[in-house]
Image (cartoon, rainbow, N blue to C red):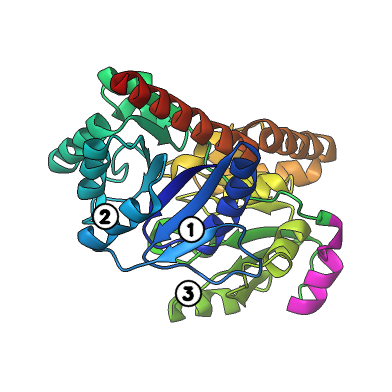
Amino acid sequence: MKKVILISSYAFHYRLKVYNYFSKIFHKQGWEFVLLSDGTDAIDAELSFRVIVERQNVLTYKQHIDREQPDAVITFLTLKDLINFPVAVYCKIKKIPLVVWTKSIDIKSPNHLVKNFLYYQLHNISDAMVLYTPTEIKYVQKKNHHKVFFGYNTLAFDGFEKDIVPGLDYVKAKYSIRQDKILLFAATIKPDKNLNALLDHPCKNQQVAVVIAGRGINETQLQKISSLSNYYYVGQVPYDDYEMNALFKASRFFTTPNDLGLALNQAFFWSKPVVALEGSHSVEVYYLQSGHNGYLAKDMNDFWNFINRMLADNQAYQTLTENCRKTYETKADISNMFRGFMDAIEFATSKIHAKVS
């Protein structure tokens, strides 16, 4: 059996579930999947792949590569990871097909000349690249476009049983929510998520509950929430198969006004329209088509007006939810993500073999 090693910085819970899926499909195609990382979250699922946890060190990681003798290596590292370039160069020297999984550059500072130069060198070294979405290819030099593949960034819900997740009645009872119509904000509460937009321009429709979940809230934000009768802070909710998904299942809409991330995918999995502000968002905003499966508002007045219009027009709302479902199934399903990685590995492998022969 062939072997692929994913060399990653710290692996969070949602990534481990993605890798579980990868491992199973890789195995069906004759590949063993191994994760080499400097740390991982604990999750409520058994891992179907080997995990090697080792603090980042160039010599140590070289030894692991020598010991494992992989047929391909995927790196999922940033410029802050000092092993990034040494691992890439070592794979080049050893003629191990190298796939670089990346956003192409640091998209939060796209005009940083030094960072861009370093990323371009990494692109040059790689045998193939996997980008999160097609949007990031504009940051890749044209000479490297031929080796770009798209691993549409998403979450793993394969085998997930929606029917066993409790819904609206459970959520209302647990969190003492009075309203049936819920707008959910769920994220680590950082400035770039812009929770303050919801608090400084609050929802005036008392039939709508604005439910806020996540760690990192500050005292000023808590005081504002306590002064709003239709706002609820439910704290940090476990990212397991039930509690967080129950909130998504119970909601009518999802938002982080700015910096939409993978939670957008979870909303679409539950067929929930996503409403946010125009502006800076992570790459997952690629899935959001304003007016089709959600809405990007010009300001908070536009934001609330859209939600009120959809609540008053059930047919228009149902069209949105159906489009969310279709977007998830056609674009954001994890099978699309895996296909990008498999295609990249096959391309990189054939490229190396052609050079060797």
57 lies above or below 338: below
Instruction: Answer whether residue 171 is magenta in the image.
Output: yes
- Mark 3 burial class by Cα count in 10 Å: few <14, some 14-19, many 20+: some
Q: Main secondary structure of the magenta part?
A: helix
Q: Which residue is identified by label 1? A: 197
Residue located at (74% from left, 42% from top): 310
Q: Which residue is identified by label 2? A: 62
- Residue 178 seen in render: no
Residue located at (45% from left, 81% from top): 219
Q: Secondary structure at mark 2?
A: helix
Query: Where in the figure is residue 142, as x and y percent of width and height?
Result: 28, 18
Relative to 275, is 149 on the left or the right? left
- Residue 67 seen in render: yes
Q: Secondary structure at mark 1?
A: helix
Tell me the distance, in whole angstroms, between the alpha carbons under discs 1 and 3: 14 Å
Q: Nearer the viewer, residue 152 or 269?
A: 152
Q: Looking at the image, is mark 1 or mark 3 earlier in the sequence?
A: 1
- Mark 2 burial class by Cα count in 10 Å: few <14, some 14-19, many 20+: some
At label 2, which amino acid type do we have? Lys
Query: Where in the figure is residue 233, as x and y percent of width and height?
Result: 61, 74
Q: Nearer the viewer, residue 336 or 318?
A: 336
Instruction: Answer whether residue 133 is magenta in the image.
Output: no
Relative to 45, is 86 on the left or the right? left
Q: Which residues are magenta?
A: 163-175
